[in-house]
Image (cartoon, rainbow, N blue to C red):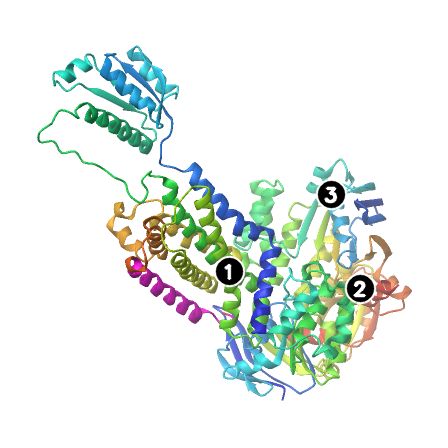
């Protein structure tokens, strides 16, 4: 196992940030920790990168113990913390040189690993990091975390605050990096990014809700999901909440994702109910559950 | 070694690219030394005085001549009636009025002890006191002159002689103090800020999760400031020698060695501060309140330690700046060598080792 | 339906750089309008002109019937604002925050009292009224700060990336609050670069390099660009 986590607990003053966290990441896997802000993602990353000592439980990274063998871990992993941790007043090239230097290597030595990413920011190599756009900073930070050819890469919310185009590019880069055999642990609050991982772990309030492949995790949602839309969103929500058979009704963009308490929903019956509530242009379709539906079902 | 040099180079980039800290580093010492040298002074110079002479005889004239001939005073007004005394003070024209009583000369010759009254404006008590002492001294010396030939029996005349700073220039007093303050400020505050900045940015996390050893991070952070502080010390000494004509009597090498020792103490304190503060702002507040104030108030820089209440005198002993100021004064003004200040040096060295050890121990290899 | 926001050829230049290039659009009363764009697309500059902090270089705009050149004070009284970065004071209690923001908008003490009561009942905050806001979960803070932005019954509420990073359930509760406010006639103007937030709006407008590249209901945009999500709409627009 590349990463092995066993019953980790960690508390701050009066908050339990991590509760009995256990999971394994196989070599070469792209593993996603998916959860909202405050779920404990950053604390988990800091424990695994040896920055925090857990209150109880143990974990290994590349078979090194995170407490007793923390020096070996620090020598062999790459870490990109939540805020792109770059020196704002140093140029792109100076930043990269600096991080290469503290890992006792040079840009040339491992150039092939970062080449694909670095060529995109190379035109700006004399620009200070503080003056780069969010997407550029993200790429530079990734180069800095890769420069010493780590065996495991920890990326804490690498796509937060970055525009959709850069986000997509970033995930493509991760996929390509994965081909080199690198193990990647990535965290994100965006549910739609879950599908891009090999396996994911849902985390909320310090606990892991479920671990599985993105496809398999959808099967954890046992109920049928219906897309319902009508002319007045607010009244639609209120009406569905008042409906006696409603199991769950959550807004999803322009529709409501609805699930019924019964196994056999009679669409006509629901249609008539909504009609009676004064709604118009009602459309009810069955749809497939999304990652987000599953997350909410598990969190409830 | 290459690793270490790379780190130091990065630190220099940070310092040189931040105009504000560059100004604090190099503008501040110059401004402070000039301020203390010129503006804040205990000396008196060309103080305006008025004289109300009831007697107008040969002796009073001679005394008046002597006073106005000195560079300390200049005669602003001769007053002719009682009411004018108050009005000259109120107008702020003069700082002191001298009143000679009637028949001054006659009383002097008949040994009747003539009286001269010195009225000073005590809104500024220190100056008032100094003016009184100076005038008194001038009158006494005049009396010595006229009594030269008369052997007076049973008279004890103290003959004061101010050594090491014979002209009583206050700038000589302030230079060691200012140098101490600035070295403390630059070394402790700037180091603590530069370390906490990395914490705020999140780069400290990356440094920690790297093969860098704590000692490498600390010394990489500290070396540039040692270098800059030494430059600062040199600038201050040059300024005081060339602008204020301050002599440096003792060995420059010894001075340099003691300065580096103090700089290291301050840097260790800076690292210590950075271990207990999470933000640059906190680091700055702790440096200012926790280091600067004691250095200015309890080190003997401005207020003499001997006249402090006993508890404060005791506390002053744990302030490294106190010992450094003693050492500086001894080397610069007295020109003594290490044999006279080995005790103070040893105390400072002890403190330095203590703080270095403490800060290395306190330096966290993990996040809190 | 009346238009509460009317923008005509609104332009802002900084020297030779045109941050906002002759944009025009209308927003109806009670509409949820999404204003999207990548960082640096001119979103922030446009909003600043609309809420009366920045004077436009040329063009016209009226907000709730007030002119953005001459009636900025009236504009400020008739809008509410909530940003993710600054929402409430962490070191004040829930009650103190409500009282403070009510006071800013000139509500008298009795109104503040009744409004506070209403708000606390509606959000079920009974247990935490006297707790510091800093100790509450992010989702709660956002719900409270939205309610606070509505305290003075503004005609338009500007929301800046309101739900980024919040857990999916709280986020939906938040959108339910927005739907409710819109249903009661408040216009909601959402700026964001999170495309999934855009899905919830009645209409969205996408800015690229200072210009409006697309303006329609999310449903129609997805149809036009033949994709399944606003995220993909944005990707297609950015590639053009």
Query: Residue C27: x and y, percent?
Result: 81, 49
Q: Badge 1 is on which residue? A: B227
The secondary structure type at the circle numbered 2 is loop
Q: Disc 2 vs disc 3: which is toward the camera? A: 3
User: B221 or B172, which is in the foreground?
Assistant: B172
Compared across the picture, whether A199 is left or right of B288 comes to right
In the picture provided, is A6 more to the left or to the right than B143? right
Q: Residue drawn 73% across and 42% down?
A: C52
Q: Along the horizontal axis of the image, is A27 left or right of B216?
A: right
- Which corner quadrant of the image does residue B2 belong to? bottom right
Q: Is residue B302 above or below residue B363?
A: above
Q: How many numbered discs sit on the rendered protein?
A: 3
Number of the front mark, 2 or 1: 1
**At 56% across and 52% down in the image, what residue appears?**
B22
Which residue matches tag 2? A254
Q: Which residues are magenta?
A: B341-367
Nearer to us of marks 3 and 1 is 1
Q: CA–CA distance between discs 3 and 1? A: 47 Å
Q: Which residue is mark 3?
A: C54
Say left or right for C178 vs B56. right
Residue at image position (55%, 64%) is B199
Q: Are marks 2 and 1 on the same chain?
A: no
The reply to whether the magenta stretch includes residue A283 is: no
């Amino acid at each position: 196992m590349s990463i092995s986590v066993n019953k980790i607990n960690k508390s701050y003053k009066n908050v339990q940030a991590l509760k009995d966290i256990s999971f394994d990441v196989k070599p070469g896997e792209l593993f996603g920790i998916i959860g909202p802000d405050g779920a404990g993602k950053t604390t988990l990353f800091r424990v695994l990168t040896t920055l925090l000592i857990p209150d109880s439980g143990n974990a290994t990274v590349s078979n090194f113990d995170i407490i007793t063998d923390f020096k070996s871990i620090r020598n062999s992993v790459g870490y990109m913390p939540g805020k792109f941790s770059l020196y704002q007043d140093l140029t792109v090239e100076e930043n990269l040189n600096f991080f290469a230097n503290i890992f006792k290597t040079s840009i040339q030595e491992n150039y092939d690993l970062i080449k694909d990413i670095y060529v995109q920011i190379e035109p700006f190599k004399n620009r200070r990091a503080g003056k780069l756009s969010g997407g550029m900073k993200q790429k530079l930070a990734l180069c800095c975390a890769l420069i010493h050819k780590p065996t495991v890469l920890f990326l804490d919310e690498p796509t937060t605050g970055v525009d959709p185009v850069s986000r997509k590019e970033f995930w493509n880069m991760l996929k390509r990096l994965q081909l080199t055999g690198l193990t990647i642990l990535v965290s994100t609050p965006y549910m739609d990014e879950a599908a891009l991982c090999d396996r994911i772990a849902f985390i909320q309030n310090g606990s892991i809700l479920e671990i599985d492949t993105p496809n398999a995790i959808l099967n954890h949602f046992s109920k049928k999901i219906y897309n319902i839309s009508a002319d007045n969103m607010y009244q639609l929500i209120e009406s569905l909440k008042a409906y006696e058979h409603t199991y769950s009704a959550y807004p999803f963009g322009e529709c409501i994702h609805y699930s019924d308490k019964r196994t056999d929903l009679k669409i006509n019956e629901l249609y008539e109910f909504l009609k009676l509530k004064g709604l118009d242009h009602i459309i009810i379709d069955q749809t497939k559950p999304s990652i987000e539906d599953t997350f909410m079902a598990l969190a409830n | 070694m290459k690793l270490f040099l790379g780190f130091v180079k990065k630190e220099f980039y940070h310092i040189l690219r931040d105009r504000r800290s560059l100004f604090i580093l190099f503008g501040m010492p110059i401004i402070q030394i000039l301020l203390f040298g010129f503006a804040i002074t205990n000396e008196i110079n060309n103080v305006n005085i008025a004289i109300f002479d009831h007697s107008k005889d040969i002796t009073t004239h001679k005394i008046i001549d002597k006073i106005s001939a000195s560079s300390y005073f200049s005669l602003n007004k001769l007053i002719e009636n009682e009411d004018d005394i108050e009005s000259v003070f109120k107008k702020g024209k003069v700082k002191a009025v001298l009143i000679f009583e009637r028949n001054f000369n006659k009383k002097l010759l008949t040994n009747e002890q003539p009286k001269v009254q010195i009225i000073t404006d005590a809104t500024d008590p220190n100056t008032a006191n100094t003016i009184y002492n100076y005038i008194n001294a001038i009158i006494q010396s005049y009396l010595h002159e006229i009594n030269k030939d008369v052997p007076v029996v049973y008279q004890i005349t103290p003959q004061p002689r101010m050594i090491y700073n014979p002209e009583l220039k206050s700038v000589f007093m302030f230079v060691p103090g200012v140098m101490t303050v600035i070295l403390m400020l630059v070394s402790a505050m700037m180091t603590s800020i530069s370390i906490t900045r990395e914490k705020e940015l999140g780069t400290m996390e990356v440094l920690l999760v790297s093969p860098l050893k704590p000692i490498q991070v600390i010394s990489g952070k500290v070396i540039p400031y040692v270098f800059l502080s030494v430059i600062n010390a040199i600038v201050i000494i040059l300024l005081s020698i060339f602008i204020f004509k301050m002599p440096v009597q003792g060995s420059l090498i010894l001075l340099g060695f003691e300065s580096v020792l103090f700089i290291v103490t301050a840097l260790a304190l800076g690292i210590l501060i950075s271990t207990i503060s999470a933000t640059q702002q906190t680091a700055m507040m702790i440096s200012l309140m926790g280091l600067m104030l004691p250095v200015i108030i309890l080190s003997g820089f401005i207020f003499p330690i001997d006249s402090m209440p006993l508890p404060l005198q005791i506390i002053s002993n744990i302030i490294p700046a106190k010992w450094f100021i003693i050492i500086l004064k001894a080397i610069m003004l007295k020109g003594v060598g290490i044999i006279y200040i080995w005790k103070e040096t040893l105390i400072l060295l002890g403190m330095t080792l203590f703080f270095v050890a403490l800060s290395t121990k306190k330096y966290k290899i993990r996040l809190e | 339906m009346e238009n509460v926001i009317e923008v005509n050829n609104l332009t802002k230049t900084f020297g030779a750089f045109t941050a906002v290039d002759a944009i025009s659009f209308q927003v109806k009363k009670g509409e949820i309008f999404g204003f999207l764009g990548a960082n640096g697309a001119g979103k922030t500059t446009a909003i600043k002109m609309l809420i009366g902090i920045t004077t436009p270089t040329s063009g016209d705009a009226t907000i709730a019937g007030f002119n953005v050149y001459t009636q900025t004070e009236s504009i400020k009284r008739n809008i509410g604002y909530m940003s993710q970065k600054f929402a409430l004071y962490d070191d004040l209690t829930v009650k103190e925050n409500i009282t403070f923001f009510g006071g800013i908008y000139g509500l008298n003490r009795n109104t503040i009292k009744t409004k506070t009561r209403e708000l606390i009942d509606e959000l079920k905050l009974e247990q935490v009224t006297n707790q510091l806001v800093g100790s509450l979960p992010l989702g709660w803070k956002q719900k409270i700060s939205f309610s606070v932005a509505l305290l003075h019954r503004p005609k338009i509420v500007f929301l800046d990336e309101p739900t980024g990073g919040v857990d999916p359930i709280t986020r939906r509760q938040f959108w339910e609050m927005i739907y409710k406010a819109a249903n009661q006639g408040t216009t909601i103007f959402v700026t964001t670069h999170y495309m999934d937030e855009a899905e919830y709006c009645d209409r969205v407008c996408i800015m690229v390099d200072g210009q409006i590249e697309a303006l329609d209901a999310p449903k129609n945009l997805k149809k036009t660009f033949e994709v399944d999500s606003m995220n993909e709409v944005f990707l297609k627009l950015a590639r053009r």
